[in-house]
Amino acid sequence: MIQKRKDGKGRALCREKRLIDIHCHILPGVDDGANDLEETMEMLEMACSSGISSIIATPHYKNRTKEETEELKKVFQEVKKEVKKYFPNFQLYLGNEIYYTEDTLNDLIEGRALTLAGSRYVLIEFLPSAMFSQILNAVRTLKTAGYLPILAHIERYECLLDEKGEAYLNDLKKAGAYFQVNGRTFKRKTERKWCKKYMKNYSIDFVATDGHNRKDRTPKMNFAAGWITRKFGYKTAEKLFVTNPQKILEGRKREE
């Protein structure tokens, strides 16, 4: 195993090229992510160069029909063929980032909304202004139905950032939620400070790119992986970027 570099740059994990991105809008023309196949392939090249070896493509989901979901699967298979031509060792999987509504559970059961890589993990999002009770009820509903809810980019939800945020996060954890943070968050001082606090008590489970394009929302992991390695050590970074995501791909519940 490659050890952490003594120069303090924390790039060992990226050099190993084992990082797994569980949240990325890399499929062309299906949401506000990649516009076309050319941009998809450029984003993929960026991901590879930052140490990523696998991506779960997570196009936005909101009230899609079964026919539209089948079309999405066709796009995914076409992209997967192209990926294998140019990046034969790269692994691409399909899922959704689901805007949670009262119909979400039924959409999952009927196959319109997709879990992550065919597992029981479900990536859900809300408006930044969502009430805590709304988020908690969603987590409980999905957990009771046998799903494993992952809250996308938890650093965005206002109710988790105020003085009650810590108690709310604890309640969500007890209800069965997993927390995902966007890698770009670690470039912003205020949000980085918030994340650092919850890194210390092991609340955060996943760091992902939430990549959308090749310009300002790129699918790169290297900065976040390096920063976390420097501040919290190789093992913590490995858990967030490799071990926990791998358990999604294997369909296993993350061990506590």
Image (cartoon, grey):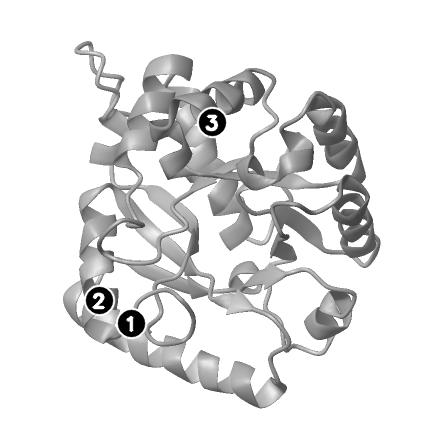
Image vertical order of residue 72 relative to residue 189, above or below: below
Image vertical order of residue 134 relative to residue 242, above or below: below
Q: Are marks 2 and 1 in contact (CB under 8 Å)?
A: yes
Mark 3 or mark 1: name the one nearer the start of the chain: 1
Q: How far from the left and from the top, in percent, is residue 66? A: 61, 86
* Residue that extends furthest to the top in the rendered view of this protein: 6
Q: What SS does tag 3 mark?
A: helix
Asked which quadrant contains residue 114, the reply is bottom right
Task: Say which amino acid is labelled 2.
Answer: Glu
**In this view, the mark in front (2 or 3):** 3
Task: Say which amino acid is labelled 3.
Answer: Glu
Q: How far from the left and from the top, in percent, is residue 39? A: 22, 66
Of 81 and 228, the residue lying toward us: 228
Q: What SS does tag 1 mark?
A: loop
For the C terminus, give its image quadrant: top right
* Residue that extends furthest to the bottom in the rendered view of this protein: 67
Task: Say which amino acid is labelled 1.
Answer: Asn
Q: How far from the left and from the top, in percent, is residue 146? A: 77, 56
Asked which quadrant contains residue 31, the reply is bottom left
Q: How far from the left and from the top, in percent, is residue 144? A: 84, 53
Identified at 25% across, 66% down, the residue is: 40
Please give the label number shown on residue 191: 3
Q: What SS does tag 2 mark?
A: helix
Q: Which residue is mark 1?
A: 35
For the N terminus, give its image quadrant: top left
Q: Which residue is mark 2?
A: 39
